[in-house]
Image: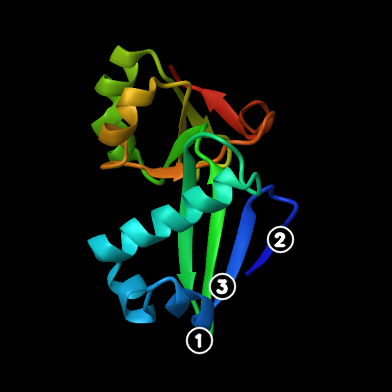
Amino acid sequence: MERYSWRDGKIRLRLKERELMDRGISRDGLIRFDADTKRKLTALITEIQHRGELPDGELFAEIFPGKSGVVIQIAPEKNGFFLSGTDEMLAVFPLVKKMGAALYRRLDGKGFYLAHFPAEARSVLIEFAAPCIVRDGMLKERCKRII
C-alpha cells in the first residue's frame, strides 16, 4: 500500500488489486459497494487509523477504482457541505436556519456552502448536499454569508 498526500491535505492510499484480494475485497465489490465491501473497507481504514497513519475521529473517504487497484482519498470529516444550486439551497434553508448553521453564497455565483452545523444534522444534510472540506479563510475570500 502506498500512502501519500497532496497540497489539499487529503491523504491518498493506493492499494493494488493483490492487496485488495488479500483483504477479501474484489474490484466488482468496490464498484457495487455492497455491505460486505463497506464493512471490509471500514475495518481497513480503522486498522490504519489505529496505527497512527490516519487522523483520529470521523473520516470522509472517497473510493476511486482503477485498472490495477484502487485509490482511497481520505480527509477529516469536519467542515461543510456544498450545494450546487439555488433549488437545493431553498430546500435546506429552513432546516439550516433552525439549527443555527451558517449558509454562504459563493461570490462567483457557483453554489453555496453550509458550515458550523451540529453533528446530528449531517445525516439529514447528506440528502441535499455534497460533503466538502472548507479551508480556513475560503469562506471569507470567496463567499458571502447569507444567514
Disc 3 or 1, which lies upstream in sequence?
A: 3
Left or right: 138, with 104 as reference point: right
How far is the residue under mark 2 from the one under mark 1? Answer: 19 Å
Picture residue at 41% right of the left edge, 21% below the top: 117
Picture residue at 62% right of the left edge, 70% below the top: 1
Q: Amino acid at mark 2?
A: Tyr
Q: Are marks 2 and 3 in contact (CB under 8 Å)?
A: no
Residue 36 placement: quadrant? bottom left
How far is the residue under mark 2 from the one under mark 3? Answer: 12 Å
Left or right: 95, with 64 as reference point: left
Residue furthest toward the right?
A: 7
Disc 2 or 3, which lies upstream in sequence?
A: 2
Residue under circle 2?
4
Q: Amino acid at mark 3?
A: Leu
Q: What crowding class fits label 1: few (fewer than 14 Cα within 10 Å), some (14-19), or many (20 or more)?
A: few
- What quarter of the picture does the C terminus occupy? top left
- Give coordinates of residue 63: x percent, y percent: 46, 64
Q: Identify which residue, 1 or 115, lies in the foreground.
A: 1
Residue under circle 3?
15
> Which numbered circle lies on residue 67?
1
- Give coordinates of residue 83: x percent, y percent: 40, 41
Left or right: 117, with 107 as reference point: left
